[in-house]
């Protein structure tokens, strides 16, 4: 798969990656010169153009490597789920009947729940249109912080470095079921590999080898001067008194303190696991609530499907989960969806463990 131009500054589309260029594009879309286009402040264009632009922004982050036709057929849900509790739905449907039957307590309970729902606000269910993408095994590996990007996670799966429930798995299109465990080979995780030793020692040896012939040429000329200097030094040493033993010990301690200072970084032969995060990776280091990773074993358990509640969505996205971009994207897909699934198309369906 090709991902050479995914961080193009002209398009400036945020991706599932820790790359510094991706962070810069995210800043440009959120606070930089492209903020007006992102926030839809200027409504000079048509509604269809705004929907298409919102769709391109969201799809650039959520599964940009998935073909649009495949996304609409297999990953787009039929409708957005209702996240209200079932008790509230039942009471709201039977509120009129209870009022006619003079059941005052049931009516009061229904009105209380309705007021509480109104106070909390609606859940941002628009972001749940990408819940099927978050179930993919390559996305789960990236969300568990085992890969620099979703493209690296996809390569791990294709190259056979991933186990699904203890068995080797090479299909990155698999959608996980609750309870599935994904294990990654530590040798495939880039920031857990030891860095090569610097070449400073080799450069010093080369410099010393070049300086040796020049020193040999100058020693023959400076030999008489050196003998005179040594004689003068001996005379001075006889005059100067020797320091006490305590001062010698203190100087030796100071020298040993700095010369034998242990290095904080793990060396090649040490038992510590090397850990070298890429620069500017801190904003992307988080774990969603539906995953349970174990960094000691390099594995992650997919606990449940992502959901949403009032004021919070469990699907990570660089955009507002209940904002205008998500709403316009859902309006675009509600008019242009592909739900026809013939027998030949069902045979090509990505693996869904449900």
Image (cartoon, helix red, strand yellow):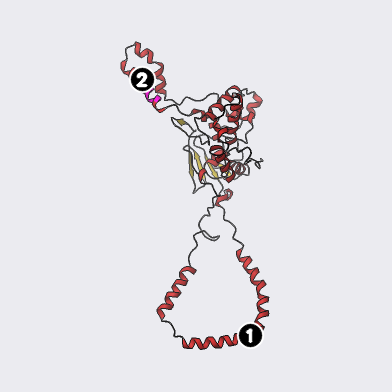
The disc placed on residue 223 is 1
Q: Which residues are magenta?
A: 113-118
In the displayed structure, 214 sits above or below 72; it is below
CA gap between label 2 and label 1 equals 106 Å
The residue tagged with tag 2: helix, strand or loop?
helix
Of tags 2 and 1, the one toward the viewer is: 1
Front residue of 187/167: it is 187
Q: Is-magenta flag for residue 115?
A: yes
In the displayed structure, 67 sits above or below 190; it is above
The answer to whether residue 235 is visible is yes
Q: Which quadrant would the N terminus be assigned to in this image?
A: top right
Identify the image quadrant of residue 194. Answer: bottom right
From the image, give the main secondary structure of the stretch colored magenta.
Answer: helix
Mark nearer the N terminus (2 vs 1): 2
Front residue of 277/326: it is 326
The disc placed on residue 111 is 2
């Amino acid at each position: 798969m090709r991902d050479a131009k995914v961080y193009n500054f002209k398009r400036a589309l945020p991706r599932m990656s820790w790359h510094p260029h991706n962070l810069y594009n995210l800043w440009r879309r959120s606070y930089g010169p492209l903020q007006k286009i992102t926030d839809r402040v200027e409504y000079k264009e048509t509604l269809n153009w705004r929907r298409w632009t919102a769709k391109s922004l969201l799809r650039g982050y959520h599964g940009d490597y998935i073909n649009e036709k495949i996304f609409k057929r297999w990953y787009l849900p039929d409708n957005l789920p209702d996240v209200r509790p079932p008790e509230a739905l039942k009471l709201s449907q039977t509120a009129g009947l209870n009022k006619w039957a003079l059941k005052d307590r049931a009516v009061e309970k229904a009105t209380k729940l309705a007021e509480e729902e109104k106070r909390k606000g609606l859940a941002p269910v628009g972001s749940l249109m990408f819940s099927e993408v978050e179930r993919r095994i390559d996305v789960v590996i990236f969300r568990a912080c085992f890969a620099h990007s979703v493209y690296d996670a996809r390569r791990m799966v294709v190259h056979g470095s991933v186990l699904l429930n203890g068995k080797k798995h090479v299909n990155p299109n698999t959608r996980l079921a609750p309870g599935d465990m994904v294990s990654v080979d530590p040798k495939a995780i880039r920031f857990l590999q030891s860095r090569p030793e610097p070449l400073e020692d080799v450069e010093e040896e080369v410099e010393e080898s070049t300086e040796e012939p020049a020193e040999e040429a100058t020693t023959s000329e400076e030999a008489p001067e050196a003998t005179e200097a040594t004689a003068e030094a001996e005379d001075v040493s006889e005059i100067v008194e020797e320091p006490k033993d305590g001062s010698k010990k203190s100087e030796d301690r100071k020298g040993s303190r700095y010369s034998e200072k242990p290095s904080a970084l793990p060396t090649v032969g040490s038992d510590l696991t090397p850990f070298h995060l890429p620069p500017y990776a801190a904003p992307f280091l988080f774990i969603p609530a539906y995953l349970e990773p174990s960094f000691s074993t390099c594995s992650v358990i997919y606990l449940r499907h992502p959901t949403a509640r009032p004021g919070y969505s469990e699907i990570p996205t660089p955009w507002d989960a209940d904002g205008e971009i998500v709403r316009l994207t859902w309006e675009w897909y509600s008019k242009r969806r592909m739900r026809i699934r013939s027998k030949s198309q069902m045979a090509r369906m990505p693996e869904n463990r449900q």
